[in-house]
Structures are given as structure tokens and as C-alpha cells.
Amino acid sequence: MAELVFTKVEGLGNDFLLVDRRSASVDAVEHELRALSALAPRACDRRTGVGGDGILVLGPPREDGHDASMWVINHDGSRPQMCGNGLRCVALVVAGTGTREVTIDTDAGPRRCRVTADAIDAGEVEVDMGPGVELGEHRPTAGEGRTFTGISMGNPHAVTFVGPSEDPEALARRIGPGVERSPEYPEGTNVELAQVRSDGVLLWVWERGCGITQACGTGACATAVAAVRAGLQPSEAPIAVHLPGGSLEIRVPAEPSQGVRMRGPARVVFEGRLAT
């Protein structure tokens, strides 16, 4: 690649460089992922690059009847299976204006999205994120005695609820790095520090491969699932999850095998080219 043509997108401040490869084959896109992973730390650097939490690669669908595929590359070049905020951004780009349902293939399986956009560069997206799968509980050494509930939303999350007088941001920054790399999580984990409030859940996330981000869609879903199963929030009702970049609406079904639904904004910021 002599240069990287990209679209800067964001959902609640969780920002990405979106690379559109829909004209290529799935095999060609997957072959290119290694080069893009190597480029990610420089391209996503906020001082010497474009800046972003990662790279989203938009490609052709992997299954007939679907609309597109999404691959995710973290800021550090690692490859998560899923990214909720990134998925909303991809769905917005694929859907265009108006109200439209699209299905995006991901490494965690296909995800159905309903996009409502009055303009080509901004809209609201509701996503069926699939069921939240319990991964058990752990008390990692780095967690300072706290119990973390494991929930998979296609990628792993370790959720703990903090007291009303505690600071979830300070805790996320202090213990997040150690919990992410704890032996209990051999492939690493996203780490959620959540505080239940009268208006929903306040959430700070230490993202695997990224650190603190403005928002984490899968983290919001995992936290809502953990809260419902612990009896801290109701099932079937909208749960407001408040992140540094804004709020997401999450609905957790009473039946665990059904999909968790996430609703939130997505926006196209600008288009650009980066010399590689």
C-alpha cells in the first residue's frame, strides 16, 4: 500500500479509521489484514498519525443474502472478534440515508442492524448483538479483591460493580491493565468498572488492546447482562449505560439465549489519505 484511503468514523467518541474493501474478495481482504495490523499503531497514534481506537475493514459479505463484512483491528494491531461501536459505524456507511435493515458478517457471527439516518454522515443504529454468554467468575490478583463476572458478547468481558462512593474511572485506570492480562484470562479481556445509579449504569471500560476509551458497545452490553442476571437491573426494559462519550440504550432479554439489543449513534467525521 503506497497510501491508505480511509473514512474517519465515530460512535460516542469511540473512533476508527474505516477502510472500504467491498470491491475486493473476502480472501483478498483477509490477506491484507496482516499489513493493516502492522500499520495500526502508527495510523492510530493521536500525535503522529490520524488518531483512532482502531481500524475497521469493510468488505464483501461472507454469506449470501448479507450486506457486508466487518473486520476489527485494535490500536495496538491486535484483532478482537467484535466491536459494538464500530459495528454501528459500519452499518451506517453500508445503509446510507433513510431507515434500512442490514446484516453485517463479523468474526463473532452475523449481526442484524436497523439504521435510521436523516443524513449520509450521521444516524441512530439498533443492533441485535447476540446473546450474552456467561464465562464464570474470577478474583484476579490485580483486581484488589473484587469479583469479576465474565460475559462474552462475541469477545470477552470481565465486569465488576463498584460502590456508590467509589470512582469507577480511577479504578479502571488503576486495575484495568492488570486484570486485562491476568492469568485467568489467557487471551486477555476487556475490563468493566460499573456503578449502578438511579438513572441507569455509569461505566468505565479498559479495553483489551486499547486501554481507556470513550465508549465500548460490547462492554455496555456485557455490563447490562451482568446487571440483569445479578438482579440490579430489569430485563426487557431499556437500560441507560452512561459512558464517557455518551449513553447507549441496552435491552437484555429475559430468555438468555435471545439477543441483547443495543441502540446508539454513529457518525462519519471526514475522509482522508495516509501515506504508508
Image (cartoon, rainbow, N blue to C red):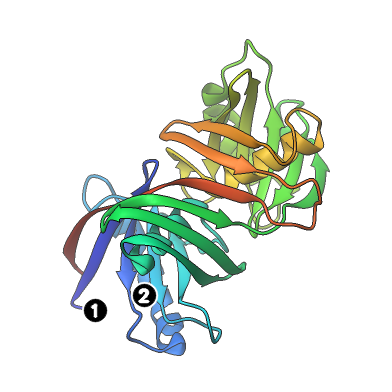
Return the residue nearer the eye: 21 or 200.
Answer: 200
> What residue is rendered at 52% in x and 70% in y?
103
Task: Please state which amino acid type lies under the numbered disc 2.
Answer: Ala
Q: Is residue 260 left or right of residue 65?
A: right
Task: Please state which amino acid type lies under the numbered disc 1.
Answer: Met
Relative image position of residue 21 (x, y in whole percent): 34, 78
**CB under 8 Å between callouts 2 and 1?**
yes
Say few, some or many: other residues with alpha carbon within 10 Å of mark 2 (under 14 / 14 to 19 / 20 or more).
Answer: few
Relative image position of residue 95 (x, y in whole percent): 37, 66
The residue tagged 1 is 1
> What residue is rendered at 74% in x and 47% in y?
253
> What residue is rendered at 62% in x and 67% in y?
108
Relative image position of residue 22 (x, y in whole percent): 35, 80
Relative image position of residue 227 (x, y in whole percent): 73, 34
Task: Residue 140: tell me if it is visible.
Answer: no
Disc on res. 160: none
The residue tagged 2 is 35
Return the residue nearer the eye: 47 or 4.
Answer: 4
| 131 vs 235: above or below | below
